[in-house]
Amino acid sequence: MLDHHSHFPLLKRLYEGQALQYFDNAATTPKPQMVIDAINDYYNLHNANVHRGPNFLAEEATDLYEGARAKVAKFIGAESEEIIFTSGATFGLNLVARSWGEQNLKKGDVIALSRAEHHANLVPWLQLKEKIGIEIKYIELNDDGTLSLDSLDKIFDQSKLRLIAVTLASNVLGQYYNLETVIKRAQAQGVIIVIDAAQAIAHRPLDVKTLGADFVSFSGHKLFAPSGIGVLYGRKGLLDSMPAFLGGGNMISEVLAQSFSSAVLPNKFEAGTPNIEGAIALGAAIDFIKKIGWKEIISREEELSKYFIQVIKKLDFVKVLGGEEERLPVFALSLNGLHPHDAADLLGERGIIVRAGHHCAQSLHDYLKVKASLRASLSFYNTKEEIDRFVVALSEIKQIFKA
Amino acid sequence: MDIYAQNILDHYQRPRHRGRMTNADVSFQELNRSCGDDITVFVKMKDDLIANISFEGDGCAISVAMVSILSEEMIGKTKEYVLSLGLDDLQKLLGIKISPRRSKCALISLRAIQGALNSL
């Protein structure tokens, strides 16, 4: 295996003399040097507001910002005007719920979510339910974490079904969902499809046109870019028909004393000065992914996943939530006789960064009847040696609590 | 390792006063859903002093040890005294310094007892 640790300055840090082992990639990834350099270069050389000043600096900043949009568009198979820069996946999902939802849904309309949704793709819809009285139905999960086909049949039987908002990969179960059938059925019934790609985006290539999604939202910071930048893809016809979300500078075509008209896409949905350096750095993160290559990323992650599942079975107090097929290297572990919070704290003392709790998927934990879990989420740069170190450390920590 | 000092492990593994109290004056549940902690406290008063405390539920080592220690130490104390306690007092009782990332674990146990007393 190639050593990919060297791309990430964070991984050179020691904690009390121990190597830092980062197993919290589902929360946020470390940033490669080339992403950090892109932010530095922007501030050192090109700092200016975009789309505004008639000077060379503003032109450079605008070119870099719009260049990043073009990179994102190409990365997911979209047109540049279909790419809205947001603050993250959460913002994009809220934008769809508020702008499309409030314009198109009325009391009694049905929307469906999967049981595996992160709070970001759940709470905006609950808010819409409170506001206009839509009904929320759930796509049930099979024991292996996949979507129940019986349950989908029942969802598609709903005559008032208007929208399905579903994750492409679960941040708890690690399941990567094959949404092809769901989307085909949705298209046939004129049901809008919203995809939360926050977790999937750093692990598998995404082509929005092949997928056939109407909206796709993801964050930069889970894709090796900084926090505070994200992307909402929307099908052009839909974005054109929707009212602007936030009002302010940049999003207008004309402002009069008593009225305004919105700008064309994508500016219509980007009110105010955007996160310019974040967008540019997201472009650099996409360059980074391309440099590593999907083939390398996918083959390493599959190898790491198989190895993790194999060696974690040696620990009889640990149960991996979800199935073993079609999964990302994201493992939420249910622990017997050891509280996840204690485990995560003591793993941290050994330099191993993991997360404990419900990982912003409380209703999924309730559904699985697990109070809290310990999550080890890997990325292509992690190694089998790190998995071994994790298993040994977890086993030692369990011994401390042995009554 | 100091947060898993012998005293804390002892209270975590053999918690004192664990169980439902049938003749309690009041009970109170405190949840920390993001950690998976769920502590319910039962309190019995006598002559304006705490006569007995017990608890049910699950939590991490810090939260369970904390409620176990408090269930012993707060007997004979007044409601006003318990309501005046804060994180510094809990650190003294635990005998260790609690890092910011674990302070809510200790506080959930105190909040449960304070919640019960406020419901009297």
Image (cartoon, coloured by chain):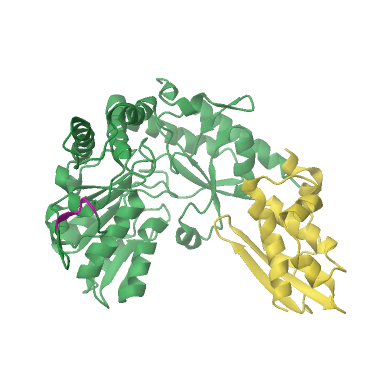
Chain colours: A green, B yellow
Whether residue A253 is in magenta: the answer is yes
Question: What count of labels does the image hold?
Answer: 0
Look at the image and tell me whether residue A99 can be seen: yes
In the rendered structure, the answer to whether residue A282 lies left or right of residue B104 reads left
Percent of width and height locating residue A75: 22, 37
Between A209 and B82, the one nearer to me in the picture: B82
Snapshot quadrant of residue A110 = bottom left
Q: Work out whether A275 lies above or below A94.
A: above
Whether residue A283 is in magenta: the answer is no
Q: Work out whether A175 lies above or below B59.
A: above
Between A184 and A215, the one nearer to me in the picture: A215
Q: Work out whether A308 lies above or below B84.
A: above
Q: Residue at x 31, y 26 (%)?
A: A292
Q: Quadrant of the N terminus of chain A?
A: top left
Look at the image and tell me whether residue A337 can be seen: no
Q: Residue at x 63, y 24 (%)?
A: A17
Percent of width and height locating residue B56: 71, 66
Q: Residue at x 72, y 68 (%)?
A: B114
Percent of width and height locating residue A200: 33, 44
Snapshot quadrant of residue A284 = top left
Percent of width and height locating residue B5: 78, 43
**Magenta part of the chain:** A249-254
Between B90 and A263, the one nearer to me in the picture: A263
Q: Residue at x 27, y 34 (%)?
A: A283
In the rendered structure, the answer to whether residue A76 lies left or right of residue A367 reads left
Direction front: furthest residue: A257
